Image (cartoon, coloured by chain):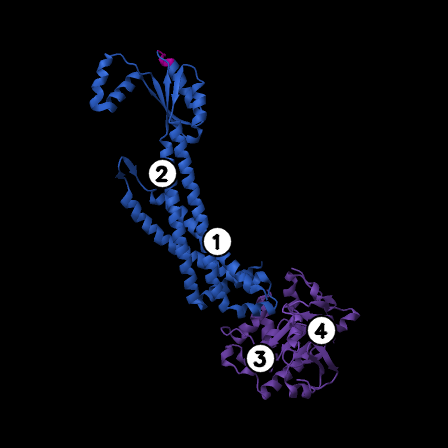
Amino acid sequence: MKLRTGKFFIREGFRSLKRNRTMSAAATTSVVAALLVIGIFFLIMLNIDYAATKLESQIEMMVYLNDGLSENIINTMSTEIKSINGVKAVEFISKDVALKNLEKNWGENSYLLEGLDGDNPLPDSFLITLSDPNQASGVALSVSAISNIEKVVYGKEELAKLLSTTYVLRMSSLVIILILLFISIFIIANTIKLTLYARRREIGIMKFVGATDWFVRMPFIIEGIIVGIIGAVSASIVLGAAYYYCAGIVKNQMIGFMSISLMPFNQIITSMVMLLIIVGILIGAIGSLISVRKFIRV
Amino acid sequence: MFNLPWNCYSKGCDKLIQFRNVSKEFPDGNKVLRNINLTINNGEFVFLVGSSGAGKSTIIKLLLKEIEPTTGSIMVNEKDITKYKRREIPFHRRNIGVVFQDFRLLQEKTVYENVAFAMEVIEAPPKEIRRQVPIVLSMVGLSKKAGLYPSQLSGGEQQRVSLARAMVNSPSILIADEPTGNLDPEMSWDIMKTLSEINQRGTTILMATHAREIVDGMKKRVVAVESGIITRDEKRGGYGNEA
């Protein structure tokens, strides 16, 4: 495509937007509406992902050791575990510390421990934090291969449940966004069809003086892209402001024993604006392309 | 981008347009053309006469490749246009200028812009556009009205704008579909004068019309179509008794 042709398309695109103000406003409004809905779902998806990642990072693994190991051996074991792929951190918990923790956890009932008479039945242990919960079973296998280890314990079933739940949530929000995308393309195609109907004369003239199909299409596609960008910017402003407000309110609210908070505004805003602009351009361009097809067959 | 060899130097190119055994039947069973044979030579001025629905418009649409014949072939410049692919159609149309009864001008563009538009959409260089548009506007006598909008012009002037637009890319064929249909007699003769001048510069003209006085007055070749067949083809004919 020649440069001057590009200029011609952009000039014609803007001109026709100005000329068909009412229809352009209608098309932009539908783009904004569609993008708001898509944006809301995107924000929900990101926050589910955020919460899931947070939950997953809290998955821990307990490694119980044989009794009577020297400090030296324990240190070697610790470094050995640290080197395993998927292990984020290793914390040594001696049997004394473990007993104190137990006392603390039992609270009022801790008098029951008095019956032990200074005899500590708890083993020494390592507390492992995982970098990726999906690798839990592999890590467990590698750890149990190390000598002097009595037992490896982690919430295997709970972990599997959590992983499958977050997977389903992620996938379903993705599917919903895709469906919304198709619906909005359809709506925008129909709105643009109305502007095209008003201009079928112009298209007819272009065709009989020998304009190629692409040449006829391009100004309309540019028009669709401009509508998409304007819609994306408006939707971004509305959604951004609303999210900023909501994130402020929800911050560190306690619901029951769970502390919930939304993903911080500055972490989410860039990806949201980028997504809305890309989706806006996409639905504007594809919408135009679909609707211009009918009129171009002259 | 590819170019069709419009500048044909071989002998056979005297025959610019040839309809060979062309029939057109619409899906509803309506046979609008029955085995038409018609040859138009380079530089001719041909009137196409006949009543409404006789098949004149079908012949024009076939030439512009808006529709395809059911059978037969249509040669333009020795090329069978029925064999052109869809993407070749625009390049075929660039060699044919068209004017219609209803002018088909863009109301929100000035006279100059309407004519320039025809060059812009085939991606002509801006320098060429600035050079060519004033030339055709002066040819149709509208140099002084270049900045006006179609609504500010008379019907005859509007038709001359559309003539300028049809000619601005120097096509070898000019098709005029009832160009005087919406004009009073005086304006009609104005248009015919311009058409004659265009023809004298070498452009082949095919004009479909109902205007008896014009056909009789011009003394050009007349092809009469009735019920899908050519009933008469005279070198210096008149409108005749048909219709």
- Please determine whether, in this image, residue A124 is positioned above or below residue B40: above
- Marks 3/4 same chain: yes
Can you give x and y, in whole percent of width and height, for residue B69 in the image?
A: 68, 68
Residue B85 appears left or right of A48 = right
- Please determine whether, in this image, residue A204 is positioned above or below residue A254: below
Residue in the foreground of this view, choosing between B176 and A76: B176
- Marks 1/3 same chain: no
Q: CA distance from mark 4 to mark 1?
A: 49 Å
User: Comparing marks 1 and 2, which lies closer to the viewer?
Assistant: 2
SS class, disc 3: helix
- Main SS of the magenta segment? loop
Q: Which chain is purple?
A: B
Residue A161 appears left or right of B181 = left
Q: CA distance from mark 3 to mark 4?
A: 32 Å
Q: CA distance from mark 1 to mark 3?
A: 42 Å
Location of mark 2 (residue): A51
Location of mark 3 (residue): B159
Segment tinted magenta in the rendering: A68-72
N-terminal-most mark, 1 or 2: 2
User: Comparing marks 1 and 3, which lies closer to the viewer?
Assistant: 1
Can you give x and y, in whole percent of width and height, for residue A241 in the image?
A: 32, 51
Location of mark 1 (residue): A282
SS class, disc 2: helix
Find out whether residue A70 is within the magenta segment.
yes
Task: Name which residue type carries label 2.
Answer: Ala
Location of mark 4 (residue): B34
| Colour for chain A in the figure | blue
Task: Name which residue type carries label 4.
Answer: Arg
Task: Name which residue type carries label 3.
Answer: Gln
Task: Name which residue type carries label 1.
Answer: Leu
